[in-house]
Amino acid sequence: MTQNQVNSAVARATGESLATIRNRGFNCSVQDLKDETGPECIGDILERLDWDQVALDRNTALFPTGHSKPR
């Protein structure tokens, strides 16, 4: 699968825009999946993806919040 095929398949499967998928950097990193010529490897990628962790990694506070101040 080419990178464009991976991006398109993930975008279709998740409902996210192609730009969002490109920014998140999906790929078929397992050798068996790199040899796939169809979208079958996308299911495996999506099963391994922890969207909550992706959101946590991307959403970091620029300033301390009231909850994180030492008392």
Image (cartoon, rainbow, N blue to C red):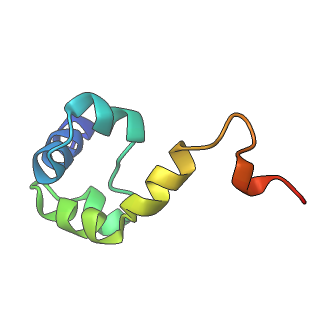
Rendering coords of residue 63 (x, y %): 73, 36
Q: Is residue 60 left or right of residue 17?
A: right
Rendering coords of residue 47 (x, y %): 28, 71
Which residue is outermost to the right?
71
Q: Identify the residue at image location x=20%, y=59%.
A: 42
Residue 13 or residue 33, whichever sits in front = 13
Q: Identify the residue at image location x=27%, y=39%.
A: 3
Q: Quadrant of the C terminus?
A: bottom right
Q: Quadrant of residue 40?
A: bottom left
Q: Quadrant of residue 15?
A: top left
In the rendered view, would you say 28 is above or below 49?
Answer: above
Rendering coords of residue 65 (x, y %): 70, 45
Residue 37 or residue 47, whichever sits in front = 47
In the rendered view, would you say 62 is above or below 35?
Answer: above
Which residue is outermost to the top?
19
Q: Identify the residue at image location x=72%, y=49%.
A: 66
Q: Identify the residue at image location x=35%, y=49%.
A: 27
Q: Is residue 60 left or right of residue 70?
A: left
Rendering coords of residue 50 (x, y %): 40, 65
Q: Quadrant of residue 8?
A: top left
Q: How many marks?
A: 0
